[in-house]
Image (cartoon, grey):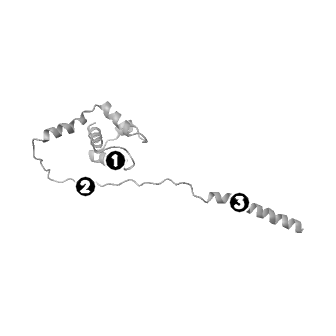
Amino acid sequence: MVKRKILSVLAAFLFISILAACASGASTPAAVPEVVEPVVETLQPAATEAVQPTVEASQPAETEAAQAPSTLSDAEMEALILQKLQGSPHTVSFILEENHTAEEWSVILDRMIGYGAKINAEEKQLIIDWLVSR
């Protein structure tokens, strides 16, 4: 009878030791991905009076330079968007099916830039203008 109690205590001790050894490996937490909250921007109402810019001699050269990139064809714009979609879950056709205003596209692109999209200010404006004109 004493022998049986000693064997039972040894078996329980062995079981608890094995259980403790297995549990100690699980105590280190796994790497939890960081959750990034999207940037929320609010649109400010536009001013009721439009300010007319004065025409200067240097403006024609600047406007021609600003208009030069906007002469991209539809195929070139789709290629640019496809390039910017690298690593994104979206497709070009998904984006082309969306119907938003310029302000809404600006907010959407700002959110995507916040998520890591590599879009500079010129590309952003070029994409917005093209998407709105479609």
Q: Earlier in the sequence, mark 2 or mark 1?
A: 2
How many discs appear?
3
Q: CA distance from mark 2 to mark 3?
A: 61 Å
Give the secondary structure at mark 3. Answer: helix
Cβ atoms at labels 2 and 3 below 8 Å apart: no
Residue 55 circle label = none
Which of discs 1 and 3 lies nearer the camera? The answer is 3
Give the secondary structure at mark 1. Answer: helix
Q: Residue 63 appears in which quarter of the rendering?
A: top left
* Mark 1: amino acid: Ile
Query: Is residue 49 positioned above or below 1 on the image?
Result: above
Q: CA distance from mark 1 to mark 3?
A: 52 Å
Residue 108 circle label = 1
Q: Position of residue 15 (x, y in %)?
A: 75, 61
Mark 3 neighbour density, 10 Å: few (under 14) some (14–19) many (20 or more): few
- The residue beneath circle 3 is 19
- The residue beneath circle 2 is 44
- Indicate the quadrant containing the N terminus: top left, top right, bottom left or bottom right: bottom right
Mark 1 neighbour density, 10 Å: few (under 14) some (14–19) many (20 or more): some
Give the secondary structure at mark 2. Answer: loop
* Mark 3: amino acid: Leu
| Residue depicted at 41% across the width and 40% down the height | 90
Left or right: where does residue 27 sit relative to residue 128? right
* Mark 2: amino acid: Gln
